[in-house]
Image (tube, rainbow, N blue to C red):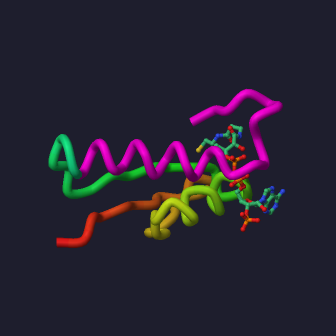
Amino acid sequence: MVLATEARGRGLGPDAARTLITYLCKTLGWRRVTVDPSATNVRAVHAWEKAGFQRMAGEGEILAMEYRPAP
Ligand SMILES: CC(C)(COP(=O)(O)OP(=O)(O)OC[C@H]1O[C@@H](n2cnc3c(N)ncnc32)[C@H](O)[C@@H]1OP(=O)(O)O)[C@@H](O)C(=O)NCCC(=O)NCCS
């Protein structure tokens, strides 16, 4: 996800991520959604966490994160 520069820092990223995972999980029935931000991209990692993603094992500079809807 890449927001326009002027749209960053206002909570729109997590809001868009929540909308996307709601569509993927409730409409399409996905049971798992993953993202792989750079571990050094603190704002992105925080944004994904705000949307409900959890950190998994990392590999080098890449941090694997996942979202699983409640059963
Ligand atoms: C990453 C991105 C999608 C996040 O969306 P956003 O709307 O800017 O995110 P938010 O404004 O909710 O900020 C996320 C959190 O990180 C925090 N944060 C922002 N910059 C930070 C920094 N430099 N260090 C630590 N935390 C930071 C914010 O305070 C916020 O937490 P809070 O709500 O608890 O205060 C957006 O900034 C973006 O498009 N960035 C450029 C592209 C990119 O890096 N994409 C990610 C690829 S995985």
In this picture, residue 13 sits left or right of residue 55: right
Residue at screen point 38% across, 52% down = 34
Q: Position of residue 58 (x, y in %)?
A: 51, 64
In this picture, residue 18 sits left or right of residue 42: left
Magenta span contains residue 9: yes
Residue at screen point 55% across, 57% down = 48
Q: Position of residue 61 (x, y in %)?
A: 63, 54
Magenta span contains residue 61: no
Q: Main secondary structure of the magenta part?
A: helix
Residue at screen point 24% across, 71% down = 70
Between 62 and 16, the one lying in front of the other is 16
In this picture, residue 42 sits left or right of residue 2: right
Toward the top, the furthest residue is 4
Between 61 and 55, the one lying in front of the other is 55
The image quadrant that residue 31 belongs to is: bottom left
Above or below 54: residue 39 = above
Between 9 and 62, the one lying in front of the other is 9
Q: Quadrant of the C terminus?
A: bottom left
Count of labels shown?
0
Q: Quadrant of the N terminus?
A: top right
Toward the right, the furthest residue is 6
- Bounds of the magenta segment: 1-25
Residue at screen point 80% across, 31% down = 5
Q: Position of residue 37 (x, y in %)?
A: 58, 49
